[in-house]
Image (spheres, rainbow, N blue to C red):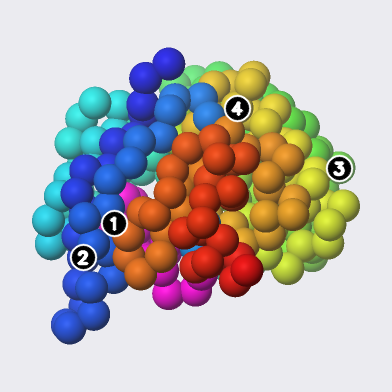
Amino acid sequence: MGPILEIRGITKSFGMLKALDDVSFEVPERSLAILIGPNGSGKTTLINVISGYHKPDAGEVLYSGSRITGLKPHIIYKLGLSRTFQIPSLFTKLTALEHLLVAEKDNPGESFLKSLSKRTWIRAERQSIEKASGILEMVGLSNVWDHTATSMSGGQMKLLEIARAIMSDAKMILLDEPISGVNPTLAHEIFSKLVSLRDTLGVTFLIVEHRLDIALDYIDTIQAMAFGKIIASGEPKKVMADSKVIESYLGA
């Protein structure tokens, strides 16, 4: 299967600091790819470039064969490339179900003219609720569908962010440390849900994560970074045995 994301020669500097230095790699469609590296290696900066929060100084990003380099985040989101954050970005007073309904695209009830006639939007509203309920079931949040974000655990909040991205019909999701601060049992559950979403919905994931003791059981490919460069790329066993990765990341 071909790549859904192609990173070609991305370079990004902040003043005298070169955060990304000619970064290139591909993420296969319908895969779980992970981005590893020590703090300061450029992982989050790269995610910010891919998702449109930073413009690169050089290079290009291709998503589903189309160039998205420098596009605004909301445009990239509409194209089906979504992201989550290390600290969940949620609406504190909305329930889990409401979070997903907000993410539904092109709801006729949001049109000023169509909203005036219930007949024009009520069917779509029912379909949205059914779709959202199904997604909450997929990620294991159906039992807290009516709970607000502030009443959830950190792990549940991260699952809710993933569910919200799925609701937007995202074909690829960038995850920034999805199991940071999550207990091991729930961390394994989160990765198991990602595998299920990949297999059942065909969603591709690019994940920034430090907890390799958990993540390595689930992923397909690794991109290892150090000092703003990709130092190793490929299958997990091959990358983790690479001497450059051992020296720069594992500290052995």
- Tell me the distance, in whole angstroms, between the alpha carbons under discs 2 and 1: 9 Å
Q: Label 4, on which residue?
A: 198
**Residue 49, disc:** 1
N-terminal of the two: label 4 or label 3?
A: 3
Residue drawn at x 44%, y 43% as measured from the top left: 233
Contact between marks 1 and 3 (CB within 8 A): the answer is no
Kindly report which numbered mark, 2 or 3, lies closer to the viewer in this rendering.
2
N-terminal of the two: label 1 or label 3?
A: 1
Kindly report which numbered mark, 1 or 3, lies closer to the viewer in this rendering.
1
Viewer-proximal residue among 229 and 128: 229
Tell me, yes or no, if residue 135 can be seen here.
no
Contact between marks 2 and 1 (CB within 8 A): the answer is yes
N-terminal of the two: label 4 or label 1?
A: 1
- Specify few, some or many for label 2: CA neighbours under 10 Å numbering under 14, 14-19, or 20 or more: many
Q: Secondary structure at mark 3?
A: helix
Q: Secondary structure at mark 1?
A: helix
Q: Which residues are magenta?
A: 38-51
- Specify few, some or many for label 4: CA neighbours under 10 Å numbering under 14, 14-19, or 20 or more: some
Q: Label 3, on which residue?
A: 143
- Tell me the distance, in whole angstroms, between the alpha carbons under discs 2 and 4: 31 Å
N-terminal of the two: label 2 or label 3?
A: 2
Contact between marks 4 and 1 (CB within 8 A): the answer is no
